[in-house]
């Protein structure tokens, strides 16, 4: 129905497809349920939906609630990973693997079998290792992630949400267990309490689809930041995209790759970012989640986007 956007006139080229997708999403009857492990997320309205597309030159399009800030949660793990790789390089991989886990994102079981080395940077244990390395390099991992998001999105208003950080801490027994367990294997460089605080602050960042689509632009620009400087080498950007494709959407990365065909990273706040290398980045938000923790409306919207435009990595 839509020709490939690269063949369309420049002005407004993604608008028709976004409007079409929003209409399809509006007739979705079962949108899943918001995350309920903390009360602040449980209150979100599953009827809300937003979607943004940011081209590599920073032109951005959106539909629905695309300017509405939501809890970015695990989407921030991509930005922590980018900073840890950028500042610390390959030695990161001594402490965290690069394989899909096949287990829930907060599982403890696999860690014991694998001697405290988490499977990948996007499950909680792996993200804790990445935050730990960034913390050891900068002493303020969460602040660095926030700065990166602000700079790349051009929105200085992106911020932490202290109430969410506090809730994460008070319901964070499992993350604390993961951190202490890894510390017992010698796989953390910084003290557990400070690491957990940094991780919870990072999870509490609130940003919109517009912000996050723009902020992830360096992944579509092969590592180049919005101001033209280099955050990652071309090869590091490729590595992060590959890991998003294989591990970015909890225990449903295979199904996401099948349906959407793009590197993606979801969060329990109902957001998902996705990358079309060389072309654009996307962010969708719909707070209702499926049983794996991915936004029902978000996955549908990305599935429709790649189907209608033909833009995917395959
Ligand atoms: N704050 C959440 C946790 O660590 C992040 C969950 C997520 O978005 O995957 O449990």
Image (cartoon, rainbow, N blue to C red):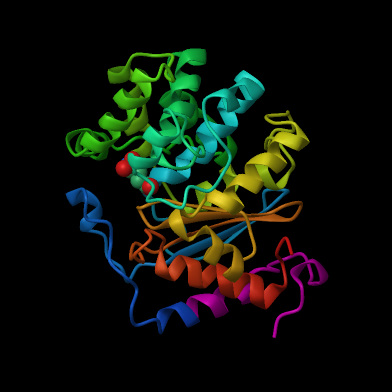
* Residue sitting nearer the eye, 186 or 63: 186
In this rendering, the answer to whether 255 lies above or below 183 is below
In this rendering, the answer to whether 100 lies above or below 91 is below
* Ligand 1 visible in quadrant: top left
Residue 175 visible in the displayed image: yes
| Coordinates of residue 128 in the picture (x, y in percent) | 41, 30
Residue 213 visible in the displayed image: no
Q: Quadrant of residue 222?
A: top right
Q: Which residues are magenta?
A: 1-23
- Residue found at the very far front of the displayed protein: 113
- Residue found at the very far right of the displayed protein: 7
**Can you say which quadrant of the picture contains the N terminus?**
bottom right
Q: Quadrant of residue 259?
A: bottom right
Q: Residue at x 32, y 32 (%)?
A: 178
Q: Residue at x 71, y 80 (%)?
A: 2
Q: Residue at x 48, y 38 (%)?
A: 77
Relative side of 93 to 296, left or right = right
In this rendering, the answer to whether 76 lies above or below 52 is above
* Residue sitting nearer the eye, 66 or 33: 33
| Coordinates of residue 26 in the picture (x, y in percent) | 41, 80
In this rendering, the answer to whether 292 lies above or below 306 is above
């Amino acid at each position: 129905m839509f020709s490939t956007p690269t063949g369309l006139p420049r002005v407004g080229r993604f608008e028709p497809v976004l409007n079409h997708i929003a209409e399809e999403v509006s007739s979705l009857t079962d949108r899943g349920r918001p995350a309920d492990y903390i009360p602040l997320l449980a209150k979100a309205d599953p009827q809300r939906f937003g979607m943004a597309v940011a081209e590599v030159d920073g032109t951005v399009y959106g539909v629905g609630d695309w300017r509405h800030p939501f809890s970015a949660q695990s989407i921030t793990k991509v930005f922590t990973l980018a900073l840890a790789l950028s500042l610390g390089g390959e030695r990161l991989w001594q402490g965290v693997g690069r394989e899909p886990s096949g287990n829930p994102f907060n599982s403890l079981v696999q860690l014991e079998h694998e001697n405290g080395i988490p499977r990948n940077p996007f499950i909680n244990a792996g993200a804790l290792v990445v935050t730990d390395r960034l913390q050891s390099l900068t002493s303020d991992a969460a602040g660095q992630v926030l700065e990166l998001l602000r700079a790349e999105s051009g929105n200085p208003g992106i911020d932490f949400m202290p109430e969410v950080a506090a809730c994460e801490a008070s319901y964070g027994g499992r993350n604390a267990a993961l951190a202490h367990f890894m510390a017992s294997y010698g796989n953390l460089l910084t003290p557990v309490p400070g690491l957990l605080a940094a991780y919870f602050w990072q999870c509490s960042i609130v940003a919109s689809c517009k912000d996050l689509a723009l902020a992830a632009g360096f992944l579509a620009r092969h590592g180049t930041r919005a101001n033209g400087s280099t955050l990652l080498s071309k090869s590091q950007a490729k590595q992060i995209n590959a890991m998003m494709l294989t591990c970015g959407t909890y225990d449903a990365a295979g199904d996401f790759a099948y349906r959407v065909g793009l590197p993606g990273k979801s969060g329990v706040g109902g957001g998902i970012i996705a990358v079309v290398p060389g072309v654009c980045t996307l962010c969708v938000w719909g707070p209702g989640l499926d049983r794996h923790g991915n936004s029902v409306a978000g996955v549908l919207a990305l599935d429709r986007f790649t189907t209608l435009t033909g833009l995917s990595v395959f």
